[in-house]
């Protein structure tokens, strides 16, 4: 008798995105403010090397360095790689070359984009110059890209610079973003599919007999693969919790008013606590040992929250191993 085919393992595109805010020290502040003013600054080390982009500490001696110098806006490509398919947020939206450019007067190379008609037009040793962005704000993107340049080496000896500008840039906000495809694997695919039928399913370790929810496909204690599926809950016990006082910036939590409670809940029959929101009770009345049950919304693929069952609190000894 043929066995039933295994359900397809789930896959979904996910995006992790957040603004990264940082302050700038005097060296980075001068460098970025200089770009806004079409000026490229480097820093001179104790042994006379000029580093572009500048750093605050010598990479060889770890000594603090503040001796700013101005280098040219022309330079030489030291190495390159062709980018056939530009991605979101990259300097150019047509194919281009990533290049390391040693600006005239610098001893290190700056990474940026080179606008070129194709890879045959790029070579190590070619001369290039900065193409400035029409509007500059004090960021590395003030360099729109590099472009081919037929001239010879310009300024080769860096000139001292005070690093002082009006309205200096003192901080930046960089958008950090990661696009990837996530697959929960066989065990969690079964768990997610069971949730859509309003069931919670874990897997039992064949050695220690513990039931893990959500299942991981292997016992984290014994290191043995798990396959036996066990339905647990739906009721459970709050093992520990936290009070959330800051509203999250996403659509899922827009309707949830702070403060609210997120808790670890040990479902009946499970040996691992999962986390979920607690509602239906004032936040300051949530406690360890509180007995709760899931609340589902129409069409929901997972419980919206858990609420008190009205049962007596669980004895601490029944859940202390899961705190």
Image (cartoon, rainbow, N blue to C red):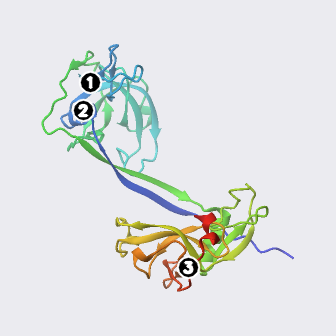
Residue tagged by mark 3? Answer: 313
User: Which residue is situated farthest in the left direction here?
Assistant: 166
Q: Nearer the viewer, mark 1 or mark 3?
A: 3
Which residue is more in the foreground, 238 or 51?
Answer: 238
> What crowding class fits label 2: few (fewer than 14 Cα within 10 Å), some (14-19), or many (20 or more)?
some
Distance (Cα) linking label 3 and label 2: 58 Å
Q: Answer with the quarter of the image where residue 120 lies.
A: top left
| Rendered position, 193 above or below 183 | below
Pointer 1 with pointer 3, Cβ within 8 A: no
Q: Is residue 314 left or right of residue 4?
A: left
Q: Residues within 10 Å of mark 3 (few under 14, many from 20)?
A: some
Measuring from the top left, give residue 99's x and y in whole percent.
Answer: 40, 32
Residue displayed at 21% across by 30% down: 39
Query: Visible in this render: residue 115?
Result: no
Q: x, y (%) of residue 42?
A: 28, 25
Q: Quadrant of the N terminus?
A: bottom right
State which quadrant residue 98 falls in. top left
**Is residue 93 shown left or right of residue 232?**
left
Left or right of residue 213: residue 69: left
Q: Mark 2 sits on what residue?
A: 26
Observer able to see residue 82:
yes
**Tag 2 and tag 1, C-beta contact below 8 Å:** yes
Q: Residue at x 75, y 72 (%)?
A: 5
Relative to 257, say whether 215 is above or below: above
The residue lying furthest to the top in this view is 47
Of helix, strand and loop, which one carries label 1? loop
Please state which of residues 126 and 202 is positioned toward the viewer in this rendering: 202
Residue at x-position 59% and y-position 67%: 273
């Amino acid at each position: 008798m043929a066995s039933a085919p295994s359900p397809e393992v789930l896959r979904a595109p996910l995006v992790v995105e957040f603004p990264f805010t940082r302050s700038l020290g005097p060296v980075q502040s001068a460098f970025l403010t200089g770009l806004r003013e079409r000026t490229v600054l480097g820093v001179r080390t104790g042994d006379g090397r000029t580093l572009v982009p500048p750093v605050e500490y010598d990479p060889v001696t770890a000594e603090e360095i503040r001796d700013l110098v101005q280098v040219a806006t022309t330079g030489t490509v030291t190495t390159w790689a062709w980018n056939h398919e530009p991605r979101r947020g990259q300097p150019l939206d047509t194919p281009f070359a990533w290049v390391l450019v040693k600006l005239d007067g610098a001893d290190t190379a700056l990474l940026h984009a080179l606008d070129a008609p194709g890879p045959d037009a790029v070579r190590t040793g070619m001369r290039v110059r900065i193409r400035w962005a029409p509007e500059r704000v004090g960021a590395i993107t003030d360099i729109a890209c590099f472009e081919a340049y037929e001239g010879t080496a310009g300024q080769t000896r860096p000139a001292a610079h005070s690093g002082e500008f009006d309205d200096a840039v003192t901080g930046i906000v960089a958008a950090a973003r990661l696009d990837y495809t996530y697959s929960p694997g066989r065990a969690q695919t079964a768990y997610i599919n069971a949730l859509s039928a309003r069931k919670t399913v874990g897997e039992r370790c064949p050695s220690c007999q513990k039931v893990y929810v959500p299942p991981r496909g292997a016992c984290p204690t014994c290191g043995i693969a798990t396959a036996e599926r066990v339905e647990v809950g739906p009721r459970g016990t709050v093992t520990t919790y936290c009070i959330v006082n800051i509203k999250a910036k996403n659509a899922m939590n827009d309707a949830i008013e702070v403060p609210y409670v997120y808790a670890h809940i040990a479902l009946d029959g499970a040996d691992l606590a999962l986390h979920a929101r607690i509602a239906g009770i004032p936040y300051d009345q949530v406690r360890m040992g509180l007995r709760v049950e899931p609340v589902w919304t129409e069409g929901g693929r997972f419980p919206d929250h858990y609420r008190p069952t009205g049962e007596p609190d669980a004895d601490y000894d029944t859940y202390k191993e899961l705190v």
